[in-house]
Image (cartoon, grey):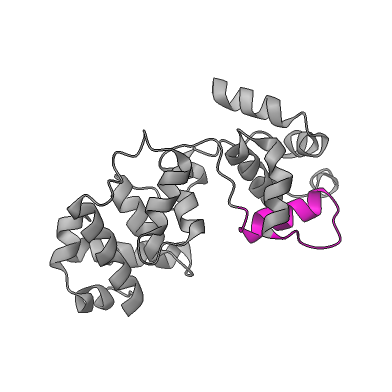
Amino acid sequence: MTCQNTTAYGNLADDPVLNRLIERVGRPDPFDWAERDFPSSTNFEAMALHIVGQQISIAAALTIFARIATAAGGIVTPDTLLVLADDDLRACGLSRAKAAYLHDLAQRQAAGTIDLEHMDDIDDATALTDLTAIHGVGLWSAQMFPIHQLERPDILPAGDIGIRRAIQSAWHLTGTPSIEETRRRATAWAPYRTYASALLWASLRAAPVAARTR
Protein backbone atom coordinates (compact mmCIF):
# COMPACT_ATOMS: atom_id res chain seq x y z
CA MET A 1 0.00 0.00 0.00
CA THR A 2 1.54 3.30 -1.11
CA CYS A 3 1.47 6.45 0.98
CA GLN A 4 -1.00 8.03 -1.45
CA ASN A 5 -3.33 5.02 -1.20
CA THR A 6 -3.23 5.26 2.58
CA THR A 7 -3.97 8.99 2.52
CA ALA A 8 -6.72 8.66 -0.09
CA TYR A 9 -8.60 5.90 1.69
CA GLY A 10 -8.05 7.58 5.04
CA ASN A 11 -9.88 10.62 3.68
CA LEU A 12 -12.62 8.59 2.00
CA ALA A 13 -13.22 6.70 5.25
CA ASP A 14 -14.69 9.92 6.67
CA ASP A 15 -17.79 9.01 4.65
CA PRO A 16 -19.49 6.28 6.71
CA VAL A 17 -20.84 4.46 3.66
CA LEU A 18 -17.49 4.42 1.89
CA ASN A 19 -15.88 3.34 5.15
CA ARG A 20 -18.17 0.30 5.25
CA LEU A 21 -17.16 -0.52 1.68
CA ILE A 22 -13.48 -0.22 2.60
CA GLU A 23 -14.03 -2.62 5.50
CA ARG A 24 -15.81 -5.05 3.16
CA VAL A 25 -13.63 -5.00 0.03
CA GLY A 26 -10.34 -3.49 1.15
CA ARG A 27 -8.42 -0.68 -0.51
CA PRO A 28 -8.04 -1.45 -4.25
CA ASP A 29 -5.18 0.26 -6.05
CA PRO A 30 -6.80 2.02 -9.02
CA PHE A 31 -3.43 2.21 -10.79
CA ASP A 32 -2.44 -1.45 -10.47
CA TRP A 33 -2.04 -3.13 -13.86
CA ALA A 34 -4.23 -5.95 -12.53
CA GLU A 35 -7.10 -3.45 -12.43
CA ARG A 36 -6.60 -2.40 -16.05
CA ASP A 37 -8.39 -3.86 -19.01
CA PHE A 38 -5.59 -3.20 -21.48
CA PRO A 39 -1.97 -3.37 -20.34
CA SER A 40 0.25 -1.69 -22.94
CA SER A 41 3.77 -0.40 -23.45
CA THR A 42 3.03 3.18 -24.58
CA ASN A 43 0.29 5.70 -23.96
CA PHE A 44 -0.47 5.83 -27.68
CA GLU A 45 -0.93 2.07 -27.79
CA ALA A 46 -3.17 2.22 -24.71
CA MET A 47 -5.45 4.81 -26.32
CA ALA A 48 -5.58 2.78 -29.52
CA LEU A 49 -6.57 -0.27 -27.47
CA HIS A 50 -9.34 1.65 -25.74
CA ILE A 51 -10.74 2.61 -29.15
CA VAL A 52 -10.53 -0.96 -30.42
CA GLY A 53 -12.19 -2.20 -27.24
CA GLN A 54 -15.25 0.04 -27.36
CA GLN A 55 -18.48 -1.99 -27.08
CA ILE A 56 -16.79 -5.38 -27.45
CA SER A 57 -15.34 -7.87 -24.97
CA ILE A 58 -11.80 -7.59 -23.68
CA ALA A 59 -10.90 -10.92 -25.27
CA ALA A 60 -12.19 -9.81 -28.67
CA ALA A 61 -10.38 -6.47 -28.40
CA LEU A 62 -7.05 -8.10 -27.60
CA THR A 63 -7.47 -10.56 -30.48
CA ILE A 64 -8.17 -7.74 -32.94
CA PHE A 65 -5.35 -5.61 -31.57
CA ALA A 66 -2.91 -8.49 -31.96
CA ARG A 67 -3.90 -8.71 -35.63
CA ILE A 68 -3.38 -4.96 -36.04
CA ALA A 69 0.05 -5.22 -34.44
CA THR A 70 0.98 -8.01 -36.83
CA ALA A 71 -0.26 -6.01 -39.84
CA ALA A 72 1.70 -3.00 -38.55
CA GLY A 73 4.94 -4.97 -38.48
CA GLY A 74 4.86 -5.96 -34.82
CA ILE A 75 4.44 -2.56 -33.16
CA VAL A 76 1.53 -0.12 -33.11
CA THR A 77 2.73 3.47 -33.54
CA PRO A 78 1.28 6.48 -35.36
CA ASP A 79 3.58 5.83 -38.34
CA THR A 80 2.83 2.10 -38.62
CA LEU A 81 -0.92 2.73 -38.32
CA LEU A 82 -0.91 5.42 -40.99
CA VAL A 83 0.76 3.02 -43.43
CA LEU A 84 -2.26 0.73 -43.13
CA ALA A 85 -5.33 1.53 -45.23
CA ASP A 86 -8.84 1.42 -43.81
CA ASP A 87 -9.38 -1.89 -45.58
CA ASP A 88 -6.25 -3.30 -43.91
CA LEU A 89 -7.65 -2.39 -40.49
CA ARG A 90 -11.07 -3.74 -41.36
CA ALA A 91 -9.45 -7.03 -42.37
CA CYS A 92 -8.14 -7.21 -38.79
CA GLY A 93 -11.72 -7.12 -37.50
CA LEU A 94 -12.40 -3.40 -37.05
CA SER A 95 -15.54 -1.64 -38.17
CA ARG A 96 -15.19 1.10 -40.76
CA ALA A 97 -15.83 3.69 -38.02
CA LYS A 98 -13.13 2.33 -35.70
CA ALA A 99 -10.62 2.17 -38.54
CA ALA A 100 -11.29 5.88 -39.13
CA TYR A 101 -10.97 6.60 -35.41
CA LEU A 102 -7.56 4.92 -35.22
CA HIS A 103 -6.34 6.85 -38.23
CA ASP A 104 -7.54 10.13 -36.67
CA LEU A 105 -5.70 9.25 -33.44
CA ALA A 106 -2.52 8.42 -35.37
CA GLN A 107 -2.73 11.60 -37.47
CA ARG A 108 -3.17 13.81 -34.40
CA GLN A 109 -0.26 12.17 -32.58
CA ALA A 110 1.99 12.31 -35.66
CA ALA A 111 1.14 15.98 -36.29
CA GLY A 112 1.68 16.95 -32.65
CA THR A 113 -1.94 18.04 -32.19
CA ILE A 114 -1.91 15.78 -29.17
CA ASP A 115 1.04 14.18 -27.40
CA LEU A 116 -0.16 11.18 -25.45
CA GLU A 117 3.34 10.33 -24.22
CA HIS A 118 3.89 13.69 -22.50
CA MET A 119 0.68 14.72 -20.75
CA ASP A 120 1.97 14.71 -17.17
CA ASP A 121 1.95 18.51 -16.92
CA ILE A 122 -1.54 18.92 -18.40
CA ASP A 123 -4.41 19.38 -15.94
CA ASP A 124 -7.29 16.91 -15.91
CA ALA A 125 -9.81 19.17 -17.64
CA THR A 126 -7.43 20.00 -20.49
CA ALA A 127 -6.46 16.35 -20.90
CA LEU A 128 -10.12 15.33 -21.19
CA THR A 129 -10.80 18.13 -23.68
CA ASP A 130 -7.84 17.07 -25.84
CA LEU A 131 -8.77 13.40 -25.71
CA THR A 132 -12.46 13.87 -26.54
CA ALA A 133 -11.42 15.92 -29.59
CA ILE A 134 -10.19 12.63 -31.12
CA HIS A 135 -12.89 11.15 -33.33
CA GLY A 136 -14.47 8.17 -31.62
CA VAL A 137 -13.18 8.98 -28.13
CA GLY A 138 -16.11 9.67 -25.82
CA LEU A 139 -15.93 10.97 -22.28
CA TRP A 140 -15.73 7.52 -20.65
CA SER A 141 -12.81 6.39 -22.83
CA ALA A 142 -11.11 9.74 -22.24
CA GLN A 143 -11.53 9.36 -18.48
CA MET A 144 -10.00 5.89 -18.50
CA PHE A 145 -6.79 7.30 -20.00
CA PRO A 146 -5.83 9.68 -17.14
CA ILE A 147 -6.78 6.97 -14.64
CA HIS A 148 -4.91 4.10 -16.24
CA GLN A 149 -2.04 5.85 -17.98
CA LEU A 150 -1.45 9.08 -16.06
CA GLU A 151 -2.48 7.79 -12.61
CA ARG A 152 -4.55 10.87 -11.84
CA PRO A 153 -6.16 10.59 -8.37
CA ASP A 154 -9.30 12.68 -8.88
CA ILE A 155 -11.21 11.36 -11.91
CA LEU A 156 -14.83 10.25 -11.52
CA PRO A 157 -16.48 8.53 -14.53
CA ALA A 158 -19.95 9.65 -13.40
CA GLY A 159 -21.56 8.21 -16.51
CA ASP A 160 -20.29 4.70 -15.80
CA ILE A 161 -23.32 2.52 -15.08
CA GLY A 162 -21.28 0.31 -12.74
CA ILE A 163 -20.36 3.24 -10.50
CA ARG A 164 -23.95 4.48 -10.48
CA ARG A 165 -25.32 1.05 -9.61
CA ALA A 166 -22.72 0.66 -6.86
CA ILE A 167 -23.86 3.98 -5.37
CA GLN A 168 -27.47 2.85 -5.58
CA SER A 169 -26.63 -0.35 -3.73
CA ALA A 170 -24.32 1.17 -1.10
CA TRP A 171 -26.68 4.03 -0.23
CA HIS A 172 -29.84 1.90 -0.60
CA LEU A 173 -31.36 4.24 -3.16
CA THR A 174 -34.66 3.36 -4.82
CA GLY A 175 -33.25 3.97 -8.27
CA THR A 176 -29.97 4.38 -10.14
CA PRO A 177 -28.69 7.93 -9.62
CA SER A 178 -28.39 10.20 -12.62
CA ILE A 179 -25.02 11.32 -13.91
CA GLU A 180 -25.51 14.77 -12.39
CA GLU A 181 -26.59 13.31 -9.05
CA THR A 182 -23.52 11.07 -9.09
CA ARG A 183 -21.29 14.08 -9.70
CA ARG A 184 -22.91 16.02 -6.86
CA ARG A 185 -22.57 13.13 -4.43
CA ALA A 186 -18.91 12.67 -5.38
CA THR A 187 -17.97 16.31 -4.76
CA ALA A 188 -17.19 15.46 -1.14
CA TRP A 189 -14.75 12.74 -2.26
CA ALA A 190 -12.35 15.16 -3.98
CA PRO A 191 -9.40 15.09 -4.42
CA TYR A 192 -9.54 11.27 -4.41
CA ARG A 193 -12.47 10.45 -6.71
CA THR A 194 -10.39 7.96 -8.70
CA TYR A 195 -9.96 5.95 -5.51
CA ALA A 196 -13.67 6.21 -4.74
CA SER A 197 -14.38 4.94 -8.26
CA ALA A 198 -12.06 1.96 -7.75
CA LEU A 199 -13.76 1.21 -4.44
CA LEU A 200 -17.23 1.36 -5.98
CA TRP A 201 -16.22 -0.90 -8.88
CA ALA A 202 -14.66 -3.36 -6.41
CA SER A 203 -17.87 -3.42 -4.38
CA LEU A 204 -19.73 -4.75 -7.42
CA ARG A 205 -17.25 -7.61 -7.82
CA ALA A 206 -17.14 -8.54 -4.13
CA ALA A 207 -19.62 -11.05 -2.74
CA PRO A 208 -21.78 -9.83 0.16
CA VAL A 209 -20.26 -10.49 3.57
CA ALA A 210 -23.03 -12.95 4.53
CA ALA A 211 -22.46 -14.98 1.37
CA ARG A 212 -18.71 -15.16 1.96
CA THR A 213 -19.03 -16.36 5.55
CA ARG A 214 -21.49 -19.20 5.02
| Residue 95 is one of the magenta-drawn residues | no
Is residue 196 left or right of 68 when viewed as pictured? right
> Considering depth in this image, is 45 or 180 the residue closer to the camera?
180
Q: Can you name the residue that lies furthest to the top here?
A: 3
Q: Position of residue 62 (x, y in %)?
A: 37, 61
> From the viewer's perspective, is 181 left or right of 194?
right
In the picture, the quarter occupied by the N terminus is top right
Q: Position of residue 129 (x, y in %)?
A: 42, 52
Task: Reply above or below: 173 against 184.
Answer: below
Along the line of sight, which residue is nearer the eye, 20 or 145? Answer: 145
* Observer able to see residue 143: yes
Query: In the image, is 72 to the left or to the right of 193?
Result: left
For the point 41% across and 62% down, the residue is 137
- Residue 38 or residue 128, whichever sits in front: 128
Quarter occupied by residue 194: top right
Question: Is residue 206 visible in this depiction of the protein?
Answer: no
Q: Nearer the viewer, residue 56 or 103?
A: 103
Tell me which residue sits at (22%, 76%) in the image: 86
Residue 149: x, y in percent?
40, 42
The residue at the point 69 percent across, 43 percent down is 186
- Residue at x 56% of width, y 24% of height: 4
- Counting every numbered tag in the picture gives 0
* Residue 133 coordinates in the image, percent (x, y): 37, 59
Query: What residue range appears in magenta?
Result: 158-178
Q: Quadrant of residue 48?
A: bottom left
- Membership of 170 in magenta stretch: yes
Q: Is residue 1 left or right of residue 12?
A: left
